[in-house]
Image (cartoon, coloured by chain):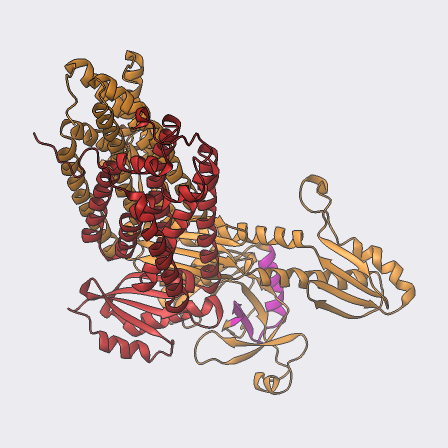
Chain colours: A red, B orange
Amino acid sequence: MRLLRIVPDDTKFDFMRFRRISFPISALLSIIAIGLYFFHGLNFGIDFRGGMLLEVQSKAGPADLAKMRTTLGGLGLGEVQLQQFGAPTDVLIRIAEQPGGDAAQQAAVQKVRGALGNEVDYRRVEVVGPRVSGELLSYGVIGLICAILGILIYLWFRFEWQFALGAMVANVHDLVLTIGFMSLLQIDFDLTSIAALLTILGYSLNDTVVIYDRIREMLRRYKKMPMEDLLNASVNSTLSRSVITHVTVTLALLALLMFGGQAIHSFTATMMFGVVLVGTYTSIFIAAPILIYLGVGENRDSGGANKSDKP
Amino acid sequence: MLYFTRWKAAAVLLTALIVCLCAVPNFFDAKTVESWPKWAQRHLVLGLDLQGGSHILLAVDTNAVRKEQLEALRDDARRVLRDARIGYTGLVVRGNSVEVRIRDGANAGQALPKLRELSQPLGGFAGTTGARTIEVSQEANNLIRLTVTEPAIAERVRQAVDQSIQIIERRVNELGTVEPLIQRQGADRVLVQVPGLQDPTRLKELLGKTAKLDFRLVDLSMSPQQAQQTRPPAESEILMSSQAPKVPYLIEKRVVVSGADLTDAQPGFDQRTSEPIVSFRFNSSGARKFAQVTQENVGKPFAIVLDNEVISAPVIREPILGGSGQISGGFTVQQANDLAILLRAGALPAPLTIIEERTVGPGLGQDSIEKGKLSSYVGAAMVIIFMFATYGLFGLFANIAVAINVAMIFGVLSLLNATLTLPGIAGIVLTVGIAVDSNVLIYERIREEVRAGRTPINAIDAGFSRALATILDSNITTFIAAAVLFYIGTGPVRGFAVTLGIGIITTVFTAFTLTRLIVAYWVRWWRPQHVPI
């Protein structure tokens, strides 16, 4: 049987040369992402902003959004957003946090239930009061920071500090771009998004660590190879693995995206962007070349290329 | 790397087998599993997002607890000063303290030790921590300040949460639902999870009521309207009726008998009017007090007050001596039922507020399970085909290892009685990705070693030993992310973290043992001349 070969053996791409393009591009994209975050904003879900979310299913055929909008608009609950959710019978209702503390949220959700009555099935009702929403956001941010620090410390022990720093730059870059992506498409930013960001962090690191592992091995073995060649050789020799792994992860995510339903749609879309698009690019074009700037391998014998020193 | 002793091989296979077997109870329905021995009954629990149900987070009103504590302290101080016959002015609650001004400077020195007696040691046996409930200090101008210490307030809140949990348990159990979960969360919160509930409205009503029931006399010295316009007498207050239209009542503040004296409450129907009612019974001290008051006040109305609302204010026709009675207040059958439940369960020590609610209907839960299954099957099928196409026989080995890996994840989850949520399923799908990656790392390394000119067995050996170090490094980093998620996450995020974390552990186990074992035996039996990848 002929086996599938996505990446041919012994590739010799000069990835390191791209750093003169990839670094400015990444810097630019990061600035755009930060700009998006500040000027376009994230579409905070009720987890972090407080408020109500109701997923209802019309019992008699497709839901009449216009009629629902007038019914709910007349309740005096401020901004009410309605959105078709999956099937034509399903509607997602979002109501902003009500002034007047936790009890006011409960009163409002009772009003909505009263107004819609028995014409709909309540598939999901979520109410997050002001006290909880503030906590959830700070826990989320603290969690992300703790994860990055924990990973950094581990890498610092396992490798040298340059590697830990390089990995962190790559990671923060991934997170920044993903947050920019979520801002651009106005994907709901809720607790699940924090889970998605942490998974992206884990995956992206996974990839970076695989390449760094190889670089460390090569550094020990080839004492005299120029740093650029060594990094290129490392990335090329792990290229096949990077591609195959990402194909399988993409396949798994694709299945979730197509058949997983609306509930995890934004989660998988974010993962797809973060893991597949950004994560791979970062570990090859940012994480590896940044080691040159951080001065890895400078204090080795730099006696030029030696014939016996080729991989 | 490729040599396994027979014992080691047996141990690896046995471990994998046992862990996989732990997943077995999930394939049988609950009835069948119940007949099995206890140790074999551990199984996965479906999260509320999959089986439907309500998740409600309640917060104890700490301000109310604090206020009540300060008012009790004020009353104690008044009693102490009166008993010692010390004159004072302006006994008030201010901020976190009670302040009192002693009228005669000569008495201040006498008042201080008396008031100090109110302070009690706090925490540990015989107050080993040294902290006290109240700090008493003397200020200028004969002012004495009694401050409730923060530890004392925290302790009181803790007790209030404990009591609330017990009362909530009694209330929720009356709903007759399966396996409700009620637990403390943080310093002042209670989490209530009730699976399989269609409409949480009734549950929320049962949770949100303090259910403080008092029997008090109606103050007839002036009409309620008059009192509203001028000022109610010092010993009375204006309370509104619970039923619409809201009518004001002038009620004495003194409580004749409180709900704490009830021993039983049952819903029923009035024999004459067949209106829904709640009949109740007092304990002996309650019965005695009630008998005495009704004897003295025949012909006057008394009020039944629930959570500061007047349910009804009937006129006492004759002394009630039997220690039992009934409450009628224009209830529906449901309302009478709920009131009986609330009275039986007792009053909450402080009001509870719902600060978070998440309810999933059973229909959505079922849909999510279907979608979770479908996407897992499709994802798995695509990955299996791709791996086989890429690595042939070794791809098949990888697929077997990954399948065992997934079975082991379910086994460990069952063993922990873990909760499977929709994000949890996503975590499993992602683990499949990671598990495949470990195989890819190994095989790609073997390929490289073959290209570097090693003999097949040498290449396989070197491939394993080098790839495993990388696998460990990359999985530990992902595991750190999962661990952080577990500690900070709640609900769905935690479910994701659990499956991801367990998945990483089983992945490392399979990569280090099972995959190696399969390849080792293949090498031993086939003595390959070249590596088919």
Q: Residue B128: x, y in percent?
A: 71, 40
Q: Residue A174: x, y in percent?
A: 36, 51
What residue is at 65 percent from the left and 59 percent from the top?
Answer: B69
What residue is at 28 percent from the left and 45 percent from the top?
Answer: B425
Q: Residue furthest left?
A: A1
> B490 or A161: which is nearer to us?
A161
Q: Is residue B245 left or right of residue A9?
A: right
Residue B10, above or below B294: above
Q: Is residue A246 magenta?
A: no
Q: Quadrant of the N terminus of chain B?
A: top left
Q: Is residue A270 left or right of residue A77?
A: left
- Is residue B274 something that shows in the picture? no
Q: Choose top left, top right, bottom left or bottom right for residue B237.
A: bottom right
- Is residue A183 something that shows in the picture? yes
Residue range in magenta is B285-309
Residue B240, above or below A180: below
Q: Quadrant of the C terminus of chain B?
A: top left
Q: Residue furthest top?
A: B6
Residue B457, above or below B48: above
Q: Residue A210: x, y in percent?
A: 33, 36
What residue is at 63 percent from the left and 60 percent from the top?
Answer: B66
Q: Residue furthest right?
A: B106
> B527 or B355: which is nearer to us?
B527
Q: Is residue B138 left or right of residue B120?
A: right
Q: Is residue B291 magenta?
A: yes
> A97 or B69: which is nearer to us?
A97
Residue A117, above or below B52: below
Q: Choose top left, top right, bottom left or bottom right for residue B321.
A: bottom right
Q: Residue A252: x, y in percent?
A: 22, 44
Q: Choose top left, top right, bottom left or bottom right for residue B202.
A: bottom left
